[in-house]
Image: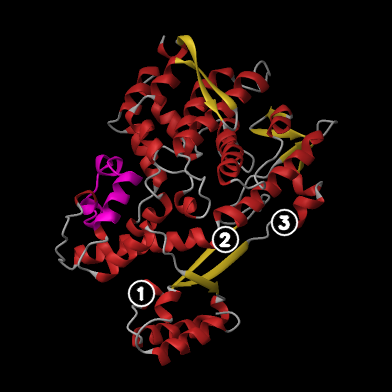
Amino acid sequence: MYATQKLAEEKVFKDPVHRYIYVRDQVIWDLINSREFQRLRRIKQLGTSYLVFHGAEHSRFSHSLGVYEIVRRISDDIFHGRPEWDESERLVVLCAALLHDLGHGPFSHSFEKVFHVDHENFTREILLGDTEVNQILTKVSGDFPKKVAEVIAKTYTNKQVVSLISSQIDADRMDYLQRDAYYTGVSYGHFDMERILRVMRPIDDQVVIKASGMHAVEDYIMSRYQMYWQVYFHPVARSAEVILRKILQRAKELHDSGYEFKQPPTHFMAFFDRTFTLKDYLALDEGVLMTYFQLWMDERDPILADMSDRFVNRRLFQYVDFDPGKDYRKLGELARLFQKAGIDPDYYLVDDSTSDLPYDFYRPGEEGERLPIHLLMPNGDIKELSRLSQIVEAISGKRRTDYKLYFPAELLIDGKKKAIKQQILEMLKEGGV
């Protein structure tokens, strides 16, 4: 039977984070070798962050293997034999762990913003559509692709299974924090995962942590907090994202206006026209996008050529802090001055914000409510983490948002209309903007 078929010899991937990743199941091995999963080798895990942290070249392929390995250890070692864990769920949770990021595209979040697509929808399409991945999953059983898709979509009936992939302390986060810390070279993302795994327990419809492991969980939450503000939301990486979005936006605008490209953007046509299929999406990877960016450096349109050159050769925008509450009028005045200076504010004056909620507990009725981390007390009681941890209580429910205004500083100290440009610079140097 395919679902229980084992490889004649166990396969091992050498991994810098988990040391080794073990594959014993034929299904998992076949999924790893599928066309759609191999595509993840050509999608960076951290998008534009490699322009800040030069080591951050790792892929969604290696992250997906890492998430699989953590879940495999939990299922095969930590939870194995416990009456509260349903052993029949093993294969579905392993497949969901491996395939959870399958729908990510090139420079995923920037691409999604411009073309109004959702990688989660593409993940579902890959799992359920005409793909090699679907063929492999269907060999397990006719409804197996749907089960895997439900786990990833968080609608699966077994909430224990869902929480291993998607919760406030899940295998996805535990892998990417450590992996991203390793490849960026920072120390923030490290925490005692071995300890956390040892104290994880399946109970009822959730996974809890033994109270003795509370300090390891505190360390994990603070590691996540630091990684978001020091790495994921780094203002220079955001500058690269701003430029990337503007390249795609400009290319779409030119296409819509009937502009004749020197090199027709064949791979983008279906996205420009909103006629794209899954096949069109899977044909894109970061190598394809970078090829177009290099070609567009020689386009006749000066904005597309300049933006492409900025991204390819890392000529990024400068930034200042921006408070939309009190500075929005100033932003309008800056846009007017940019226009007078002959600099298009739609492309060269960009406000950008990032926001994160490091930990939250259940607040009924709130949009985006989160299931909390629960601690298992020695007497069997279950208590929510922030009720016992002063560290976690201090950051619970506190959303932090950061606003920046991006602009090309070198265009403001160069060439004609110096008086207007000087006025812009003075406004940008004032507190706030």
* Badge 3 element: helix
Outermost residue on the right side: it is 379
Q: Residue at the location (80% across, 47% down)? A: 389
Q: Residue at x 72, y 40 (%)?
A: 374
Image disc number at residue 395: 3
Q: Give the CA separation, mark 2 to mark 1.
A: 23 Å
Find disc 1 in the rendering and name its residue.
346
* Amino acid type, mark 1: Asp
Numbered disc 1: secondary structure:
helix
The answer to the question of whether label 2 and label 3 lie on touching residues, with beta carbons closer than 8 A, is no
Judged by its main secondary structure, the magenta piece is helix
**Displayed quadrant of residue 67:** top right
> Which of the marked residues, 1 or 3, is nearer the chain's N terminus?
1
Q: Residue visible at 66% across and 53% down?
A: 226
Horizontal and vertical percent position of residue 65:
50, 30
Residue 355 marker: 2
The residue positioned 68% from the left and 18% from the top of the image is 83
- Residue 15: tell me if it is visible: yes
First in residue order: circle 2 vs circle 3: 2
Magenta residues (range): 268-295
| Residue 143 visible from this viewpoint | no
Q: Amino acid at mark 3?
A: Ile
